[in-house]
Image (cartoon, coloured by chain):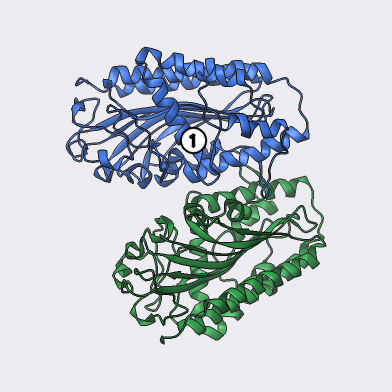
Chain colours: A green, B blue
Amino acid sequence: MTDTFIDSQSVREYLLGLQQRIVGKFEELDGQPFLRDAWEKPADAPLGGGGMTRIIEEGNVLERGGVGFSHVMGKTLPPSATAQRPELAGRGFEAMGVSLVFHPRNPYVPTVHMNVRFFIARANSGAQRPDHHPSPLGEGPGGVGESNRPAGRRNAPPLGEGHGGVGEPDKAHQAPAQSADAWWFGGGMDLTPYYATEEDARHFHATCKKALAPFGADKHPRFKKWCDEYFYLKHRNEPRGIGGVFFDDFHEMGFEQSFAMMRAVGDAFLDAYVPIVERHKHREYGPREREFQAYRRGRYVEFNLVFDRGTLFGLQSGGRTESILMSLPPKVEWKYNWQPQPGTPEARLYSEFLRPRDWA
Amino acid sequence: MTDTFIDSQSVREYLLGLQQRIVGKFEELDGQPFLRDAWEKPADAPLGGGGMTRIIEEGNVLERGGVGFSHVMGKTLPPSATAQRPELAGRGFEAMGVSLVFHPRNPYVPTVHMNVRFFIARANSGAQRPDHHPSPLGEGPGGVGESNRPAGRRNAPPLGEGHGGVGEPDKAHQAPAQSADAWWFGGGMDLTPYYATEEDARHFHATCKKALAPFGADKHPRFKKWCDEYFYLKHRNEPRGIGGVFFDDFHEMGFEQSFAMMRAVGDAFLDAYVPIVERHKHREYGPREREFQAYRRGRYVEFNLVFDRGTLFGLQSGGRTESILMSLPPKVEWKYNWQPQPGTPEARLYSEFLRPRDWA
């Protein structure tokens, strides 16, 4: 790690460009435009800042899809960010990111989520700005926001010494000095199919692996495992989907390389997902497939509202509710104790895909 | 308050009888039977015990409705119960209750929730059983489970000296001695209409008021206010519905009278709700009303998964997921930033009903 300037303006520009590229591609694919909804928090709001929400509803390909950019700042880190990092509690913070969830209409096209983000926890003085003052990065890990560990998860993975994981109480003492800003990147993408195929799973994971390869051979296995563990519905004993990659609290390579790695993940999204959409978007389906899709979407709602730290962080910090909850699916069903019939394509999702596997 | 034996066997019998009465009445009203699903946790489960789930799906009147009885015991109070009562953390506990949510098919019939429950936090020794040993009730309040305060709510109501509210940090020091069992009752019911009427609102609240009248004039205003504050979606700045009554952590009148009050609430449910169902169940509706109902049901999901302590307690303590989540609606929709047209019946729900009012 090296001392360096934190160029948050470049991060912001990258994020806005990424949002535009993804929306542009999906407007072309869908044939329908995304709505453009710029928002700004009032000056006296507990969470300041603003963002740009791009959303499509009732599209041809996407039944509901949102790509949000937000750049917010607040005076006090909320509980979802600080629960396991008491030394950062109460600090001022700044967060920017692009977050997307696409819920396709065709049940043969998987739902997808991608998020890249940059976080700064201010020094306690509140006066320093990391883009004006160098941050002594060597002093310890930063890491908050969409936390790296689901609450109460039991089997923490051995992520290596360089990880500096949020949520590992034994590392809490490695806090940055109170007078220093802390910063970190986070991101990832994961796929949630209804009628899964091995080809899709291999392609999605291989694309993630390729994107991370320039940053060290350890990155993909670490972030793949982290993803499997993060997107897990404890109360169902079930993964949300077939995974992908997830990282948070990342600064171990210094600002430039950490930022480059976040960009690599963001840039890989279209390569990872678009071929899967193209492959299935014209497949025929009927009420049976739509029903299974609506039922499985219930799991997405359960994960996002019960476990997802990004969602809870947003809601708890006074974020913009409609932008946060645009991740929820358009039409959802709950049924009591529903189980697929053995031997059906629906049963195959559970038996062959909803279990962590080495797809890449 | 008087020292007394805790007759948990009688509470259990009352709860099972109440479940049967309610299910019997609604089987008659609906014309379709409720499924009967008895469950028992494995001997080595973190949460022991069992229950009886009664559920109807695709009924004539109820699109989805569940009435659950459960009686569970665990070795360690989970976070949702102890977050604000650190002195009870780690205690063994026992909880029994009946909980119901009815989601009618006809959008003119409101959704309803009712719950009555009894909770015991074991003395630290773990050896005492409160039905065998008198509990020194004068030592302080007990109170966990479906907590009385949404996390992080700002304006705590002045509930009076006798309240002993969970979630009031300034009362946390009034903990029972570590060697004593703590017990309490909780309960309530609340109504969530889509197309509301003043007549329904007045009838529902008046029935609650009448049920509580024998237990002191203070009870209804306290519990009505508590309900308005508990069933509140902070991130929407919106009540869940038109309220009703809610209480928790209740033992201030001693076991016999506190139990009698819980029974009064349980017994009032059919009187409060059935006339409203009868009044509207044959009203005609179309896709517009169904769409509004599906949209508003999204709020129910948001409340139950983000805020409801009973749900979180169940999921965190290793409760039976399908029984806990039978409160979720059958068919739900999310739409971005949807607002009703001014002057419509949909707008009237927001302007005239989704605000606390003195209905009784």
Quadrant in which the C terminus of chain A is drawn: bottom right
**B55 in relation to A50, above or below:** above
Q: Residue at x 62, y 23 (%)?
A: B33
**Residue at point 38%, 30% (across, down):** B96
Residue B345 visible in the shown view: yes
- Observer-nearest of A350 and A99: A99
Amino acid carrying mark 1 in the image: Phe
Determine whether the residue tagged by mark 1 lies in a helix, strand or loop. Answer: loop
Q: Position of residue A283 (x, y in %)?
A: 81, 59
- Determine which residue is flagged by label 1: B231
Residue A312: x percent and y percent? 49, 54
Q: Is residue A104 left or right of residue A297?
A: right
Q: Is residue B45 left or right of residue B288?
A: left
Residue B43 placement: quadrant: top left
With respect to residue A65, does B64 lie above or below? above
For image coordinates 68% across by 43% down, the residue present is B339
For disc 1, the chain is: B
Location of the N terminus of chain A (image quadrant)? bottom left
Question: Residue shown at 40%/18% (left/top)?
Answer: B263
Q: So how many labels did they put on this image?
A: 1
Residue A355 is situated, as x and y percent measured from the top left of the image, at 55, 61
Residue, far front? A43
Confirm whether residue B24 shows in the render: no
Whether residue A209 is situated above or below residue A304 in the rendered picture: below
Q: Nearer the viewer, residue A246 or B209?
A: B209
Q: Position of residue A345 (x, y in %)?
A: 69, 54
